[in-house]
Image: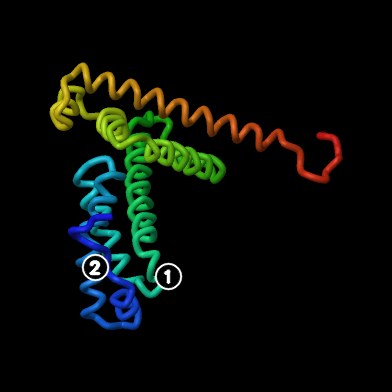
Amino acid sequence: MNQRFPWPDERLIKAAQNGDVTSLTTVVMESQPHVRKFALSLCASPQDAEDAAQEALIILYRKIGTLRATGALASWMFRIVRNECLRQVRLLVARRDEASAEPEACAEPSAEEAVLYRLEVERIAAAVSALPRDQRQVLIMRDVQGLSGRTVAHALGLSTAAMKSRLHRARAALRHALEATDQSSDQAVDRPVEGDSRPWP
């Protein structure tokens, strides 16, 4: 826990939940350093982290009354920041896929195709967001945002060789994560329903 910037105490949080504007403002201000730290560790870039932190603090200001336990502020804010960073990755993946679609293949998708597409974007985004931060950064910058290898290496303060090595590890980790979710999905489909002895048609 950051001793220099402690989390707001429970009395202050309770007063904020009861509608005291001064307490609420103080809670937001005292939470800000921790929220930014969460965002920097979870998001793909400093800009994304800034956006996620701002969104999380807005949610804190508007919805602190929904916090059930005053002692759970840190874990609540962590979940909000994580969800915001994941939303950003989803948008990036979706935009990349839309940009790479063939013009002649851009006919209106069926409802089933739209659902499958959303599920696939969600699955990829979750796998990307679960990568270690250094791998997540290089993968998003290179493969999702489409930046050149030289640009990515410069932005991350790496040599080109080190950037390529990190990117290779990130791609391998992502591929492994997606294969693992494929296998778990297959097992779930193949597993018979408990108590159902009927043969498959």
Furthest residue in direction front, as rendered? 3
Whether residue 107 sits left or right of residue 62 in the image: it is right
Other residues around mark 2 within 10 Å, as few (<14) / some (14–19) / many (≥20): many
Residue occupying the point 48% across, 39% down: 117
The circle drawn on residue 28 is 2
Q: How is the image coloured?
A: rainbow
**Few, some or many residues within 10 Å of mark 1 (<14, 14–19, 20+):** few
Residue drawn at (33%, 54%) of the image: 81
Three-letter residue code for mark 2: Val
Q: Quadrant of the C terminus?
A: top right
Report how far apart the C-alphas of labels 2 and 1 lie in the structure. Answer: 16 Å
The disc label shown at residue 126, or none: none
Q: Is residue 200 left or right of residue 128?
A: right
Q: Earlier in the sequence, mark 2 or mark 1?
A: 2
SS at mark 2 in the image? helix
Depth check, mark 2 against mark 1: the one in front is 1
Image quadrant for the N terminus?
A: bottom left
Left or right side of 79 for 6: left
71 lies above or below 18: above
For the point 24% across and 62% down, which residue is it? Answer: 6
x then y, percent, for residue 149: 20, 23
Looking at the picture, which amino acid does disc 1 mark?
Ala
Q: Position of residue 25 (x, y in %)?
A: 21, 74
Q: Name the residue tied to disc 1.
A: 69
Asked where in the image residue 101 lies, by quadrant, the reply is: top left
Between 38 and 47, which is closer to the camera in this rendering? 38
Could you tell me which secondary element the residue under label 1 belongs to?
loop
Total count of labels? 2
| Residue 135 sits in quarter | top left
Residue 80: percent from left, percent from top:
36, 57
Residue 27, given in percent of the width and then of the height, sits at: 25, 70
Residue drawn at x 66%, y 37% is 188
